[in-house]
Image: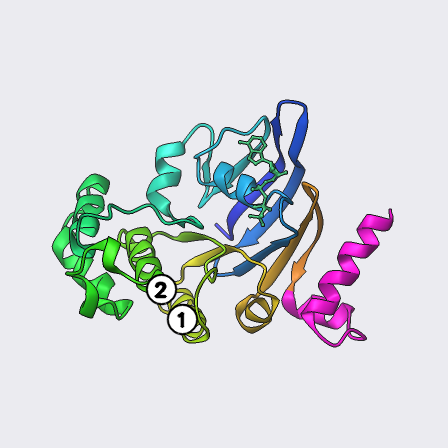
Amino acid sequence: MKNAIEIKNLTKKYGTFTAVDSISLTVKKGDIFGFLGHNGAGKTTTTNMLTTLLEPTSGRATIAGFDILSKPIKVRQNIGYVPENVQLYDTLTAYENLEFFANLSGIAHPKDSINETLEFLDAVSFVHKKIGELSKGMRQRIGLAQAIIHKPSVLFLDEPSAGLDPTGIKQLREIILRLNKEEGTTIFMNTHLLLEVSKICTAIGVLNHGKLVYTDTLANTLKRFKNEDSLEQIYFSIESDTNDK
Ligand code: ATP
């Protein structure tokens, strides 16, 4: 299987409003895919459908070869998801939260997996603090730990850098790169931080008012738009081209 994610005509309507409009997209195994688009473009709605949290109105998608509609449990076993607002129990410690989720997911050796994940994320030092006492960056690290404890082959991140300071953003970038290199994890990342995208993504897609208006590898994109001097300029050029049509 070459593709981690295959999306065909995926659509979501909220009443008469079409939030995601028949998008078709492929993300190759091992890619770090940057999913770009203005506020309200439909990125979270797409991610929620791909992670089986939201039922599509029409269309289909497979994740790691499993259909989101007919094999949702298989999909969940093969993915991790860090939503923009990580949901954890504030009154439990970070470790207790991870224990709770590890037990729920039924992994074979929960304690070993938790410790291994915490070491990988360099999060051992604050694991016995209550979630309510953690900084945004630490909390996000625990959200990430929860999402990768079962070693998913595809990891979805929704605005992972939101609210992080420059050090936190750099650490997160290094973690994403290590996960991708050492574990072979495919990453699907909704983001507004184009500098981050230019540093780590191998492919991008641009969503504009629910429509996928562009997708290609980062290398091809930089070649095709060689007269633009940054990914930010390229992004604006793609957006304004499609708004003009
Ligand atoms: P952002 O970058 O701001 O997070 P986004 O690209 O993730 O935005 P979505 O959150 O997917 O965008 O929202 C897409 C559109 O769908 C928006 O116009 C939003 O108002 C609308 N929308 C999202 N959820 C619902 C809902 N439950 N009911 C009705 N409309 C919704």
Query: Residue 222 magenta-drawn?
Result: yes
Q: What element carries label 1?
A: helix
Among the two numbered marks 2 and 1 on one chain, the one whose residue lies closer to the N terminus: 2
Q: How crowded is mark 2: few (under 14 residues within 10 Å), some or many (20 or more)?
A: some
Three-letter amino acid code at the position of disc 2: Gly
Q: Give the range drawn in magenta.
A: 218-245
Q: Residues within 10 Å of mark 1 (few under 14, many from 20)?
A: some
Query: Residue 58 magenta-drawn?
Result: no
Q: In which quarter of the image is ligand 1?
A: top right
- What residue is rendered at 50% in x and 54% in y? 188
Q: Nearer the viewer, residue 244 or 225?
A: 244
Residue 74, image x and y in percent?
A: 36, 37
Q: According to the image, label 1 marks what residue?
A: 168
Which residue appears farthest toward the right when viewing the image? 245
- What residue is rendered at 42% in x and 53% in y? 155
Which residue appears farthest toward the front when viewing the image? 133
Residue 127, image x and y in percent?
A: 18, 62
Circles 2 and 1 in contact, beta carbons < 8 Å:
yes
* Mark number displayed over residue 221: none
As drawn, is 18 to the left or to the right of 74?
Answer: right
The scheme the figure's colours follow is rainbow
Three-letter amino acid code at the position of disc 1: Gly
Q: According to the image, label 2 marks what residue?
A: 137
Quarter-of-image position of residue 238: bottom right
Counting the numbered discs, the total is 2
Alpha-carbon span between mark 2 and mark 1: 6 Å
Q: What element carries label 2?
A: helix
